Amino acid sequence: MDHKRIFTPGVKPPSDNGKPAWWFAFQGTKLLIEPNGSSAAIPFDSHIDRLGLRILRQNFLGYLHEHPCYAVELADGIKLPEGLSLEGLRQVYGRVDEDIFWLAARAIQIVDWDRTHQFCSRCGNPTVSRQTERSKECTKCGQIHFPRIAPAVIVLVERGNQLLLARSRHFAPGMYSVLAGFVEPGETLEETVAREVKEESGILVKDIRYFSSQPWPFPHSLMIGFTAHYAGGEITLEDSEVEAAGWFTADNLPPQPGKISIARKLIDWFVEKQKRKL
Ligand SMILES: [Zn+2]
């Protein structure tokens, strides 16, 4: 797989020079792909019109290795040309290059924002896209509307050679993961980490350290990963979302989230660290 292409974001589309572009086209939450055995491709053509689809809106995203990239909203109920299909983003993961997948994750958030911000949430009049940045301006009251991003923390808590995992009621049967939760207005990320771990498990934490972050397009989160150490408390489940939690060692882990997620990257990091200690 090619991971060396550079993506340069932008909002002002280039003048048409006939160069092929990447088209990240969505109908609802489904992405238009060309399946090819176990892999898939994103339409790469000079004009998406050539695919014979009805386009509602399009947004320029930027350039991937000099090729323009567009986020496109397709009309409902269109008949797809032969060789194309519409599939959920999760089903596309692992079938396209990693950089293409994360561009699709970016595109779906722009499509969703564009669709839901055609009118001003303050006064109800139509908005127009601004040319200088990714935002929309109300034609009546001038209010500026930016794409929504909901920050959420996700944290791996360690206690000696164990890590804290929990099960949400919404998880697949048997699956456990690290704890996560949305940032509330007025909180620092570290405060969110401490609050979420306490609320969901009853555990107190210290040594909260940044790990890495990941955009999460279901529907528009930014997951901000942390590690932390156990500082006290017993596991108590008062949060109705969490149905089980426990301390696990690296050699005795329950089923975990897929490799797409930062949750899995945190767990893998812990497992690797334990292996190095042996
Ligand atoms: Zn307005």
Image: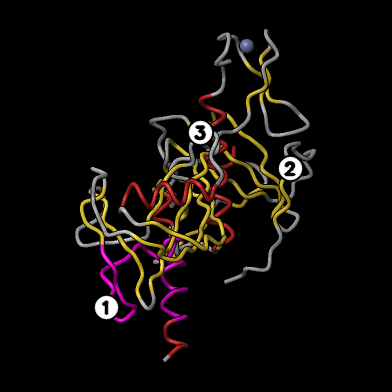
The three-letter code of the residue at mark 1 reads Asn
Which residue sits at x=45%, y=88%?
277
Q: Is residue 265 magenta?
A: yes
Magenta residues span: 246-273
Q: Secondary structure at mark 1?
A: loop
User: Depth check: 2 or 40 in front?
Assistant: 2
Q: What residue is pinned by disc 2?
A: 10
Which residue sits at x=50%, y=47%?
191
Q: Secondary structure at mark 3?
A: helix
Badges 2 and 3: C-beta atoms under 8 Å apart? no
Left or right of 10? Residue 146 is left
The three-letter code of the residue at mark 2 reads Gly
Q: Disc 2 or disc 1, which is closer to the eye?
A: 1
Task: Measure the alpha-carbon separation of dots 3 and 1.
Answer: 40 Å
Task: Measure the alpha-carbon separation of dots 2 and 1.
Answer: 46 Å
Which of the two discs, 3 and 1, labels the residue nearer the N terminus?
3
Task: Measure the alpha-carbon separation of dots 2 and 3.
Answer: 18 Å
Which label belongs to residue 112?
3
Q: Quadrant of the N terminus?
A: bottom right
Residue 250, given in percent of the width and then of the height, sits at: 34, 78
Q: What residue is pinned by disc 1?
A: 252
Q: Is residue 254 above or below residue 96?
A: below
Using a 10 Å C-alpha cutoff, classify the residue at mark 1 as few (fewer than 14 neighbours), some (14 to 19) or many (20 or more).
Answer: few
Q: Is residue 211 magenta?
A: no
